[in-house]
Structures are given as C-alpha cells and as structure tokens.
Amino acid sequence: MAVTKTEPINGSTTKSSAPPSTSMPLKSDLLSILSLKSLRLKTKQQELLIRVSILCLVYVLAFITRLFSVLRYESMIHEFDPYFNYRTTLFLTQKGFYEFWNWFDSESWYPLGRIIGGTLYPGLMVTAAMMYWGLRFLRFAVHIREVCVLTAPFFASNTTLVAYFFGKEIWDTGAGLVAAVLIAICPGYISRSVAGSYDNEGVAIFALLLTFYLFVKAVNTGSLAWGLASAFGYFYMVSAWGGYVFIINLIPLYVLALLITGRYSMRLYVAYNCMYVLGMLLAMQIRFVGFQHVQSGEHMAAMGVFFLMQVFYFLDWVKHLLNDKKLFEAFLRITVTCAVGVGAIALGVGTASGYISPWSGRFYSLLDPTYAKDHIPIIASVSEHQPTAWSSFMFDFHILLFLFPAGLYFCFKRLSDATIFIVMYGLTSMYFAGVMVRLILVATPAVCLISAIAVSATIKNLTMLLRTKSKVSQTGSTKGTGGGKTSSKAMLDQSQPFQRNGAIALLFGAFYLLSRYAIHCTWVTSEAYSSPSIVLAARGAHGNRVIFDDYREAYYWLRQNTPPDAKVMSWWDYGYQITAMGNRTVIVDNNTWNNTHIATVGRAMSSYEDEAYEIMRSLDVDYVLVVFGGVTGYSSDDINKFLWMVRIGGGVFPVIKEPDYLVNGEYRVDKVCSPPRV
Amino acid sequence: MAPKPDSHTLAASSSDPSSTSSMDPLLLFLNFLPYSVLRPPRLRLKLPTFTLPSPMTVFSLVLLTYFMVVSGIVYDVIVEPPGIGSAQDPYTGSVKPLVFMPGRVNGQYIIEGLSSGFMFVVGGVGIILMDLALDKNRAKSVKVSYATAGISSVVIAYVMSMLFVRIKIPAYLH
C-alpha cells in the first residue's frame, strides 16, 4: 500500500495528449466524450482528485480496521475502565448535564462514596452524549451503547485527517498523505482505540494532535486566530485526558528550544502567549483540574517560559529604542540575570511554602522510572505501566522503527520552526514510550509523522531520479527539476539505464516494505488488540473455538440474585464492571484514589479467615468476588494477582509481610504452600 | 574619572565613560562610587561563549539516544533481567543459553534488546546513506558506495528484524 505520490514538477505544462479523432461513429462518440471529459481536468485538479480520494479511502480504512471485535463477538464495551465511562455517559444522557456535573456516587467506594462530578475528565462523555443527541435529533434511534462503542474508531478517522494537515504543515502534502495512511493502521494507536474501547485515549489522541497542529500553525503564521484555536484545542485535551500535562510541558520546552537556537520572533510570541493564557483559563473550568495550572509543580515550566517570553519581548523593545549596541549588551546581561534570579527565588518560595505542590507520583515516575517500584506499588502493579521491551516497540511500530531515525535526519537537514517541533515531540514521546508501555500510544502520532517525512523524501528522491533520467533521454535538454543530478550529463548518459532501473527496483522495494507493514498491522489488530477481555476465547481440545462469557454471567448473577443493597468486595480491577453490569455497591474500584481503602481489601484477602472476617464485617460486606481461572488456564486471575494484594496491603499495614507468602523465595500454588495462605 | 576596566566581568557597570549620553543619575553614580574605593584587577578571563552545536552533531547524539531507548534500556534498568537467559535441556540436563525471552511480548534479555535496537538503527542509517548517495557534490565512486551500503543495510536490517520477531513470537503471522 505504497503511496507513490509525485508532486507536479514546476514548469510542467498541462497534460498533453492527442485529442480523439472526431471522425468516429456514434457508439464510440460516447467513449470519446467521456475520455474528453477526463482529459479536461488540469494537472492541479487531477492532483486534488487524487488527494481527496486517498483521504476518503484512508478515513474509511481507519474506521473499518478497528471493527474486528464487533464483527467477531458483538457490539459491547471492553476492558475495565470503559465500563465506568459508559456508566457515566448513560447517567449524563438520562439525567442531564447539571446532574452529571454535581453527581455524588454512593455506590462505589463504600462507605466513602466518590464525587464523580469533580474527579473525572468529562470530555469523552460529553462528546459521546453530543453525538448521541445529534443522532437522536436527526431521528436515528440509536442506543447510547452503540455510540459509545463506535466513538473511538470515529475519532481515529478524524485523527488521520488532522495528521494529513499536520504533515502538510511540517513538510509537504505528500508527507501529509503518507502520515494519514500510516497513522490509520498503526497498531500503537489501534490498541487503545479499537471499537468497544470506550476510553479517554480514543478522544484524547485526536485532541492532542489537533492542539499540536493548531499551535504549529499559529507559530508558522503568527496569526491570533490560530492561537485562539490552539487554546480551544488545548481546552478539549484538558477535558479529555490527564495526559494533557504532556502538552503543557512539551510546548514550553519547544519554545525554549526555539529561543535557544535564536528563532525568537513575533509569531512565536503571539502564538505562545495566546495559547498559554487562554488555555490556562479555559483549563481551570474543569473541576478535576481546578487551579493546578498555578499551583502544581508540573505546570510551572509553562509559567516560567511565559515570563521568559515577556523578558525577551522587553529586551527586543529596548533594543529597538536604544541605538547603542554596547549599552544594550550590558543591559541584556543585567536583565537576564535579574529575571532568572527572580524566577528562581519565586519558584523556591512557592515550593517551600507549599503553595506549589511537588510533582505527583504518577508523573514523577516518568522522570525517574525506579521511583514507582520502591514507593508506590499500585502504580508499579499495573501491567500497562511496565517499561517497554524491544518486542513491544516492534509489535506496535514495525518498519516505522527504521523510518524514524531516517525521518529525524531529514528534519535535521531542513530545520524550521515546524520541524524542530516534530523532532522534539518525537524524541520526548519516544523516551516516555520507553519508560511505560502504555505511552507508546502518545508516541505513535510523532513516529508516524516523522516516518512519513522519511518515506515521502525518499520516494521523492527516487522518482526525481526516474523523471530526470526519462526527461533527459526523451528531450535531450534539462528542465528545471530540483534535486536531480544535472551536473555531469555525459556520465549521466552512460549510467542512465542502470540508475533508472535501480530507481524502479528501489521503488518496488519501498512498495514491498509498506505492504508488509500493512499486513503486519492488520494481523496484529486482528490477533492481539481486538479481544474484549471481558469475553475470553480459547481453542478447545479439537481445535474449535470456545467462548467464555464467565465474567458477564457472574455479574448478571449478582444483579439478579442478590438484594439491591448488597455490598460486594473484590479486587479493584473488577470494581467498575461490577458497578456497571451488576449494579451493586462495591468497596474499591479502578479509580484507585484511596490507597488505604485498597490496602484494607488487600489485607482482608491475604489474612487468615477469622481476621479477614472481622475486616469484612467492619466494611459491611455481603459478598466476595474472586476470579479463579485454574480449570481453563486463564492466566490473569486473582491467584496470579495475589502477590500484589500482599504488597499493597503490606504497604499500609506492616502486619502483612511478603516473605510470609513465599516458599523458598518463590511463589507457588501447587503442593508446597506457605502457612498464612492455607 | 573612573579607571577603565578592561575585563569582562559580570559587574553591573557600564563599560566606558562615554555613557555621558545617558541621563540616568543612578548610572553616573554607579560609575563613580565603587571605583573610587575599589580597583578592579586586570584579569585575562573570558566568559565561556556558548556556541550551538551543528545540527548533524545533535543528530548523532539523538541517534545514540534512540538506540538506547529502543533497545529497552529502561526495562533493563528497572526489571534487571539477565544478560542472556538459560534453559535446561530436559534429556541431557545441560544448561544451554537462551537468547530470546520466550512467553511474552513485553519481556527481554539485555543482549536481545541491544541486538534488535542495533538492527533498527542500521536500517535507519541505511536510508540515510541512500539519501546521501544522491548528493550532488561528491565523487561518483563515493556515491555508488554509499548507495550500495545503504541498500544492503536496509535489506539486512529488515530481514534480521523479521527473523528476530519470528523467533520471539512463534505464532507471528499465522
């Protein structure tokens, strides 16, 4: 699926072709009229037609490649977190926005309850609800579940469009088209945006790329309108995902890089100021974020760079007023020293007085990856938070791993404001992807864009080789083709056919590589990323496919056979699903906001029966849900998660000690068991 | 008049007394006061000038970092897997080395990670060499050798990476 896009060569005339002879009989007149009509399109219009059709095809492709699980099983919500999102969206559509915003949920985290209105990112729910209301307005009687299931693929298609425009902004339209194609099927993105995966990231990646595109456009044009648009894009991102911290740190880093490399300009000033001030004000509208933009250490970089920009502007203005160079240099030194000093003092005072809170554990463990292992076992226990091995990279990126360094090289060759941005985005996101598997998702757009630059530049070089050679051989004179080898024509004439054949062979090679990429992506999507994980499939004894719907059957049993006010205790993984499908109160769920509560449950799970009974009585528990996968060989059941219950419980209650549960330093369930567990 | 300091200090003083064009009384005051008491030493120090490195220098550093990240160095530091794994032959009882960690996608031994990362970087460098081969200002033989090296690097890197993936994930593409 190679996109061999050739730019129209400057100076080429309109398509020259022999008009059909008019002395043909009537039947072929129709044919001739049709061919005449198609010939009437000028090159520019042909190019537009090709581009639009490619984008339409890519849009449809991005949508349908995410539909594997809907076709195989049914249209249902996958995993754990999406069930919470689905429940809140349901509440929003049923009760309205004000009820949603002020919702206090007493059905989860018994007996504490949870202020849902103030502790979630509403972007996803509001988006799905808007689409639902829109469709209802047009009299399409859809169920909210269908809208939720298909939100992520729809936004993935929109992301491909944004990737096209972004590629066009950074490099040229060819790179934009290749970027759209690459990101449509890249497994790194598909893993979190498959149909049924109704999670924040499905919408957030669209918002991320949109914000970045609008900001780069604002920096390139210096227009206030684009700056405003990027602020609103940032607002959408803040409402959608906690990963907005990446944006609010990458953009100041980028501005700093531009300032250091001497690319300060009025455009940058306008773009950054507009985006920062307006974006910050808009972000404070989300209750969950609140005043973090002025209080939290993670957001201080943006504020520091904001003040630095004002200093730069001030210096520029003073330079303009003063005509004396030496005086200005002295003034420059004073001002920069004073500004940095004042900034450092302000930061110090703020941090020491406690007004500026330090980096939260979640984000600090990205900068220092060993932190979570020693200090926060909950963060370390999530399988998505493990560091990345090479095979995960290969699985999610395939040949993009080759094209990424090549694309970086092309960007470094042609440095501009926009390419500096994409390089920084690519490098920082790749580092974070190396720290945590889950963040491969954030790196995917950058990798796709940079690889698209590599593909586009390489294929352009090869086709230039082809076209130069053919033009030289045909016309015998050189036209103004850029990049071709026009230096020594005599040598060119000799090695012409060899180079032409070489170029054709290399084009076929590129086509082969890209088609292997497409095959890999489709295989990975079908095999690895389309499992709903609430319905399990396995191969039976005779090779037939056996479907286990145990989870949902258990939840419906709870729903139908227990009293409505029953409290269910289980490990926190299943909390959202129990609340959404079983409709019963749970003790702890996936939000994991209260470590002590989870540790209490962990302690109950790992103590002797009588101690555990005491704890459960104190929590008013009526039912305990334990997942056991022994007979089917299901590997992620509670027995395998047991050590994490011990660790987390032990983190708060020193009574629970991990070595008590190990035999000879190993964790075994079969014949030899350690006493506290028996 | 104040003695002219011929050193580049960070002092907040203006450099020459021809600043009588400035009307600022504070500046005039600052000009005279410290130097009526102090005498600046004659130093030959120079502030280190900060020159930006060339883009290609930065790019080579970036390539090195990319190699380390994509080889899974963070995984190596945190999980601390052995350099190379071992499996015991069930019949003879001898221990043979196992290069690729079997069983899961997100796990590796150190050597396995480094060799795969190296293959990725070789592939990328191959494409770069192919682009360098099209540069006008080089001798023809150099261009031909760059092109050959580039194409062979890409081919080798791709073939080896596919081989590694097939060894690691036996059910790949089935």
Image (spheres, coloured by chain):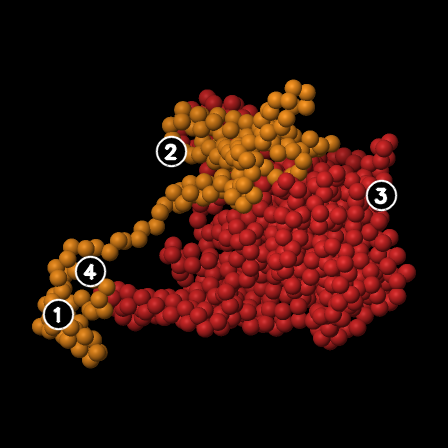
Chain colours: A red, B orange
Query: Element under label 1?
Result: loop
- The kind of residue tagged 4 is His
Residue A422: image x %, image y %? 51, 51
Which of the two discs, 4 and 2, sits closer to the camera?
4
Label 2 vs 1, first from the N-terminus: 1
Do the residues marked 4 and 2 share a common chain?
yes
Label 4 in the same subunit as label 1: yes
- Of marks 4 and 1, which one's residue comes earlier in the chain? 4
Q: Amino acid at mark 1?
A: Leu
Residue that appears at 69% across and 61% down: A600
Instruction: Give the number of the mark in front: 3 or 2.
Output: 3
Q: Is residue A317 visible?
A: yes
Q: Amino acid at mark 2?
A: Asn
Labels 3 and 2 share a subunit: no
**How far apart in space, not on screen, are marks 2 and 1 (Cα)?**
60 Å
Q: Which residue is mark 4?
A: B8
Residue A360: where, in percent of width, then height? 55, 62
Marker disc for residue B137: 2
Mark 4 vs mark 1, foreground winner is 1
Q: Where's residue B78, x and y in %?
A: 54, 45
